[in-house]
């Protein structure tokens, strides 16, 4: 078991393109940390630098207190699971899992014990005599994980291990990785572009963009206290609605006025705005789709809009609407809250009115895009 520490780590390629900028992060022993961000943000490059598969251009990487900058991958005591599984096609499942142990000249009886134990944990015992071509994608991924498990490495590195699986299998494998983590009780560093994976798997999430860390925090922190607009839109599905509006203060009360509505800020957000000495003025207001509420008719606290797309998602509807000035918004509406007659009226062009509570608002500076409370 081990901690991982990255100090001012950077990666600059020969063409002078900087893939990772001054990356600083401490990962505690037995912590599960997820690097997440859009394609090309530097998350896989950072993982490969920890593994020793990419040279670093600056800074230091420590594993269990030891600087490993100049150590070969095989000497870092890490185990890595790749996106494409990287199995040997001519070997059986058993031999694939046992391969690294045989390289270490481990006695065959010990290899047998480790391989069969890993296979039992992963539910692939019946496939040990098969070759990879006879396995499904999910079964191959379990073999790749089993090969990493038997090494008893200090740190597990996983590079988008579920991206090649279909949606149903990804959900199943996410749950299996959570159970595996509980059984292994070791340090995990996991890379994904899928924010759902990040939210469900990570103790902490590292959100990256263009080689820079935008925010580090628990799933709850990055969801409820996004540091800027990028984080706010990236975490959550569908993404957060953004509305240009005025933030108004009347005595000790705060209001926003999107599209002619007047909605009071309530809950702890009122105290936070005052404590942060936020100035009234033009801002970007963020409201998540699940917090948008359909109202029966127009009023001071409602936003008039027209329905463009109605997505039936089973237990909820995703209503894509546009306002008078063409701003697009999305509302997630539980179907249980609607009668069949109300659902039948949700057709293209239907006049709707949306509102939201004052306690669910997020406030962002228009220029810096930082959260006015948490930025």
Image: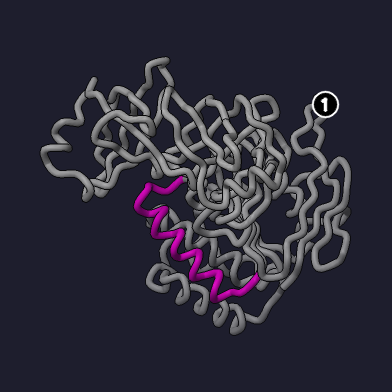
Residue at 51 percent across and 42 percent down: it is 265
Which region is colored magenta? 164-186
The N terminus lies in quadrant: bottom right
Which percent across, then down, holds residue 95? 54, 67
Residue at 83 percent across and 55 percent down: it is 61
Q: Nearer the viewer, residue 342 or 42?
A: 342
Residue reaching furthest to the top: 325
Which percent across, then down, holds residue 282? 60, 24
Which percent across, then down, holds residue 144? 53, 60
16 shown above or below 164 = above
Q: Main secondary structure of the magenta part?
A: helix
Q: Is residue 180 magenta?
A: yes
164 shown above or below 122 = above
Q: Is residue 115 left or right of residue 217?
A: left
Q: Is residue 356 magenta?
A: no
User: At numbered mark 1, what does the secondary structure look like: helix, strand or loop?
Assistant: loop
């Amino acid at each position: 078991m081990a901690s991982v520490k990255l100090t001012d780590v950077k990666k600059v390629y020969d063409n002078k393109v900087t893939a990772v900028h001054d990356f600083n992060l401490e990962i505690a022993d037995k912590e599960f940390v997820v690097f997440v961000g859009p394609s090309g943000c530097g998350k896989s490059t950072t993982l490969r630098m920890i593994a020793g598969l990419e040279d670093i251009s600056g800074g230091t990487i420590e594993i269990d207190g030891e600087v490993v900058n100049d150590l070969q991958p095989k000497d870092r005591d890490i185990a890595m699971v790749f996106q494409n599984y990287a199995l040997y096609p001519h070997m059986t499942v058993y031999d694939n899992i046992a391969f690294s142990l045989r390289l270490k000249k481990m006695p065959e009886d010990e290899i047998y014990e480790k391989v069969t134990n890993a296979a039992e944990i992963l539910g692939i015992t019946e496939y040990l005599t098969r070759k990879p071509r006879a396995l499904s994608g999910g079964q191959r991924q379990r073999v790749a994980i089993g090969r990493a498990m038997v090494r008893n490495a200090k740190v597990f590195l996983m590079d988008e291990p579920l991206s090649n699986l279909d949606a149903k299998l990804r959900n199943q494998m996410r749950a299996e990785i959570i159970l595996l983590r509980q059984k292994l009780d070791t340090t995990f560093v996991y890379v994904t572009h899928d924010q759902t994976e990040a939210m469900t798997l990570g103790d902490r999430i590292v959100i990256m963009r263009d080689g820079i860390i935008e925010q580090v925090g628990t799933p709850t922190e990055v969801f409820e206290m996004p540091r800027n607009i990028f984080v706010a839109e990236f975490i959550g599905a569908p993404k957060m609605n953004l509305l240009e509006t005025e933030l108004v203060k009347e005595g000790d009360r705060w209001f926003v006025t999107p599209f002619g509505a007047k909605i009071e800020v309530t809950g702890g957000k009122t105290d936070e705005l005052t404590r942060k000495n936020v100035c009234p003025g033009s801002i970007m207001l963020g409201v998540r789709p699940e917090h948008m509420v359909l109202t029966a008719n127009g009023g001071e606290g409602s936003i008039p809009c027209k329905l463009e797309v109605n997505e039936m998602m089973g237990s909820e509807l995703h209503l894509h609407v546009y306002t008078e000035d063409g701003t697009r918004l999305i509302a997630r509406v539980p179907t249980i809250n609607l009668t069949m007659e109300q659902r039948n009226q949700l057709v293209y062009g239907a006049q709707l009115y949306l509102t939201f509570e004052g306690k669910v608002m997020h406030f962002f500076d228009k220029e810096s895009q930082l959260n006015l409370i948490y930025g």
